[in-house]
Every structure is written in C-alpha cells, then in structure tokens.
C-alpha cells in the first residue's frame, strides 16, 4: 500500500511539473509574459484581481500637492448626520473604505472603515479616465490641442497606418473608436489585463486595429484612454503626471500627494486606471465638477469644455439603444431635469456630482454592486417603458443607492 501511494504521488509530481512546463512554454511563445506579474500579484497573494492598494506593486510617478492646501470645512451638526443601520450594512457588504458627502463645499457626512484613514491613498481605477478628460479640456483651453475633432495622427504620426487616420480625439473621448480592444476584467488574456500588468504599454496601444467604423457605436475600451494620454503628452511636451500636477492638483489645493502607476521605470502612466489619491482630494475633483470647472472661485477648466463633457454623443450602445449615459469620458445620468455626472472605477470607486444642488459624493471600496439597470425587452417592445426607467439603463445599481443615501442625509440636514 505504501508503495502504491509513493508511485501515485510521484505520478502527481511529474504531472504537475509537466503542466507548469507547458504553461510556461505557452506564455513565452504567445509573448504574454505579463501573465507572470499578474499571477504573482494576484493568485500568489490570495487575490483574484487587482486591488485598491496596489500602489507599491508598480513603478509610479508622484504628483506633488499644493503648498497652500485647501482643507474642507465640516458642518457643525455632523453628529446627527449618520448612516442608518441598513446603509451601514450595504457599505459593509461591498467593503466600503470611505464615504463622503459634501454640500456647498462642506462635508456633511464622512465615514471610514477598516483603518482607511483620511491621508490614505487608494486606486481610482477608471475614475482616472475622467481626470484625463479634464486635462484634455485644459490643454484645449491653453491652445496646446486645437480641437477634440483633430485626428489622433496629428500628434502621433505613427498612428496613421492601418486605416487609423480617421480616428479623432472625440472618438477616443466618447469611446467610439471602433478598436478591437477586449475590455474584459476577468479574462487574463484580454488587452485590459495586459495593459494593467504590461511593461510595454506603447507597443500594446500602437498595435490596436479598427474593426468598426469610428463614430457610430459606443463601446467602452480602456485603450482609448491610454491613447488619449499619449496625445496629451505629445501636445504638452511633458509627462501626464507633470501636467496633472501643475494644471490640476496644485490649483485644486490638494492636501496630499497623488501617484500615477507606470508600466516600467520612468515609463508611461497607466492613464486608463491607476491614479492614486485620498478621498478628501478626490472630493476636490467632485467640487470642480459640481461647480462646472470652477474650484473655490477659481476657474480651472473652461465652461465650454465642461458643457461638452456632459453632452451624450449620438451613438448606439451595445444594448442597441441611443447613448444617453456617456459624454466625454464622464458618465451622465438624467434624473428628471436634474443632471448627475460621475466617475466610476472597477471596484465601485465613485465621484458623483450634482451641479444643481452643489452636491458631491465620494465612495472608495473593494467591491461594487455591479449589476446594471437593463432593458425590459418585453415591455420595451410594447412601448411601455417609461422615461424614468429608460434613463437608468446601463447605470450600476450602487449609483442609485449612494444617491439615495445622500438625498436622505441632505433632507435630515435641511430639517435640523
């Protein structure tokens, strides 16, 4: 019996060895060596994917704070503006780390979980796409970029090849480039995974090809954002982080340094994700949005660009309806006559702004209620879908929970 067990274990050992050997050969032959980093930083650390505290896993570039930081004021009655038990349960279910509500640039609610302190930075994930859009707007205001309708190849001549000369900055901002980019967040072989763990973003981005006519279909693809960052760097002649520091972070009176992850030492910023900052400083982005490009009385982004940011382009979405949810790298929700625009990240990071009420919501966490509001095909075919429901299509459930929480706390505040 002992000999049988010995031979069985020996067989398993040889099988495991050959499996590892075959997997390594496949990785090397496919050129997808980024998988080594991906496996090391996730599965070998007990995680299935990227996390909000990944900063030290990558090279990074520091974005220095203001020498004259702006500190948020707090409402005097904040002790009465607490979350309900049900609201706390919701946050704990999705592992929230920070939740802030600001009204008229005053914090009216602030909660933290699991030692996520005020000065702790975390990954914005795709919220960084909206930050990139603001920087594009500033570059246009400064005349460094003439128009969002300029071809990308004006700034990146190598991108003219393979029929890509028709792609404009607008196509990138509106996610309508028609690229063959696979956005999957769960497929380790997707371009998204490669971009996150790659040491050569330039090569990945420059090999993108057009499979659909630009300017017709809305298809969310992080490759668009990364290409925008290359356009911006070329137009401004400085790194993305340097431009963000001088044109956005310092003018916003940031309290703490921010960081942008790089693909390699002294390399390119991962513009489609990976901007790290504190919840307080993310709220300053929210204030800028709620005040349509103005922060504490100082204009940082032109009103004309901020108006364009929330204009949903006439595109067809993947669920077959006209786009009513995405502007220039910003998500847009029409709550009746009230306009809500927001930035959202992979793990449910949110910066939500409601300009009509000068309301800002910031949420940082590890998980999200990612179910999307979908079309009820039966009722829509019968023409019975109402406008209020139609406007929610394609937006995540957690957006509406956080809006409901903020509305309840605002009502409490107004009655104190």
Image (cartoon, grey):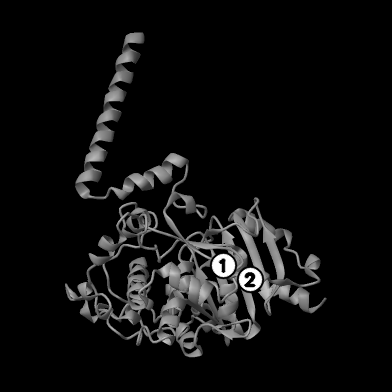
Seen from the viewer's position, the closer of residues 22 and 71 is 71
Residue sitting farthest toward the left:
162
The spot of residue 217 in percent (x, y) is 32, 77
Q: Is residue 272 left or right of residue 12?
A: right
Q: Quadrant of residue 243?
A: bottom left
Residue shown at 60%/57% (left/top)?
120
Q: Is residue 129 visible?
A: no
| Within-10-Å neighbours for mark 1: few <14, some 14–19, many 20+ | many
In the displayed structure, 129 sits above or below 29; it is below
Q: Is residue 261 visible?
A: yes
The spot of residue 99 in percent (x, y) is 64, 63
For numbered disc 2, what is the local secondary structure? loop
In the displayed structure, 64 sits above or below 28; it is below
The quarter in which the N terminus is drawn is: top left
Seen from the viewer's position, the closer of residues 86 and 414 is 414
**Mark 2, residue position:** 69
Residue sitting farthest toward the bottom:
304
Q: State the separation of the CA atoms marked 2 and 1.
A: 7 Å
For numbered disc 1, what is the local secondary structure? loop
Residue sitting farthest toward the front:
67
**Mark 1, residue position:** 65
Q: Quadrant of residue 207?
A: bottom left
In the displayed structure, 292 sits above or below 33; it is below
Count of numbered badges drawn on the protein: 2
Q: Is residue 98 left or right of residue 83?
A: left
The spot of residue 275 in percent (x, y) is 48, 63
Q: Quadrant of residue 158?
A: bottom left
Residue shown at 26%/75% (left/top)?
156
The spot of residue 389 in percent (x, y) is 52, 78
Residue shown at 26%/39% (left/top)?
23
Residue shown at 68%/58% (left/top)?
88
Residue 4, numbered circle: none
């Amino acid at each position: 019996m002992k000999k049988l067990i010995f031979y069985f274990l020996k067989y398993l050992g040889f099988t495991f060895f050959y499996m590892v050997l075959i997997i390594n050969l496949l990785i090397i032959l496919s050129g997808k060596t980024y998988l080594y980093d991906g496996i090391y930083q996730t599965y070998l650390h007990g995680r299935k994917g990227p996390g909000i505290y990944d900063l030290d896993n990558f090279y990074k570039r520091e974005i220095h704070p203001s020498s004259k930081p702006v500190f948020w004021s707090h409402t005097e009655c904040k002790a009465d503006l607490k979350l309900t038990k049900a609201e706390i349960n919701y946050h704990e279910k999705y592992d929230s780390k920070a939740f802030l509500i600001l009204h008229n640039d005053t914090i009216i609610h602030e909660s933290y979980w699991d030692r996520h302190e005020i000065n702790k930075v975390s990954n914005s994930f795709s919220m960084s796409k909206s930050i990139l859009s603001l920087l594009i707007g500033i570059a246009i205001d400064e005349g460094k970029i003439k128009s969002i309708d300029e071809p990308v190849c004006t700034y990146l001549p190598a991108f003219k090849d393979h029929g890509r000369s028709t792609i404009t900055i607008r196509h990138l901002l509106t996610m309508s480039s028609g690229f063959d980019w696979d956005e999957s967040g769960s497929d380790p072989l997707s371009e998204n995974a490669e971009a996150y763990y790659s040491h050569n973003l330039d090569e990945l981005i420059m090999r993108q090809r057009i499979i659909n006519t630009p300017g017709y279909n809305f298809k969310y693809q992080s490759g668009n954002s990364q290409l925008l960052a290359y356009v911006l760097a070329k137009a401004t002649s400085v790194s993305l982080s340097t431009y963000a520091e001088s044109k956005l972070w310092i003018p916003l009176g940031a309290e703490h340094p921010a960081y942008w992850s790089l693909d390699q030492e002294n390399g390119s910023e991962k513009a489609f994700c990976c901007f790290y900052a504190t919840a307080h400083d993310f709220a300053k982005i929210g204030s800028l949005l709620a005040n349509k490009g103005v922060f504490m009385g100082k204009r940082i982004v032109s009103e004309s660009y901020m108006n364009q940011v929330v204009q949903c382009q006439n595109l067809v979405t993947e669920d077959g309806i006209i786009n009513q949810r995405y502007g220039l790298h910003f998500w847009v929700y029409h709550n009746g006559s009230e306009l809500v625009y927001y930035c959202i990240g992979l793990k449910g990071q949110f910066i939500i702004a409601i300009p009509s009420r000068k309301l800002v919501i910031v949420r940082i966490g590890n998980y999200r209620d990612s179910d999307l509001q979908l079309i009820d095909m039966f009722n829509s075919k019968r023409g019975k879908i109402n406008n209020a429901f139609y406007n929610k299509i394609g937006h995540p459930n957690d957006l509406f929970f956080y809006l409901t929480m903020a509305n309840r706390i605002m009502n409490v505040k107004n009655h104190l």
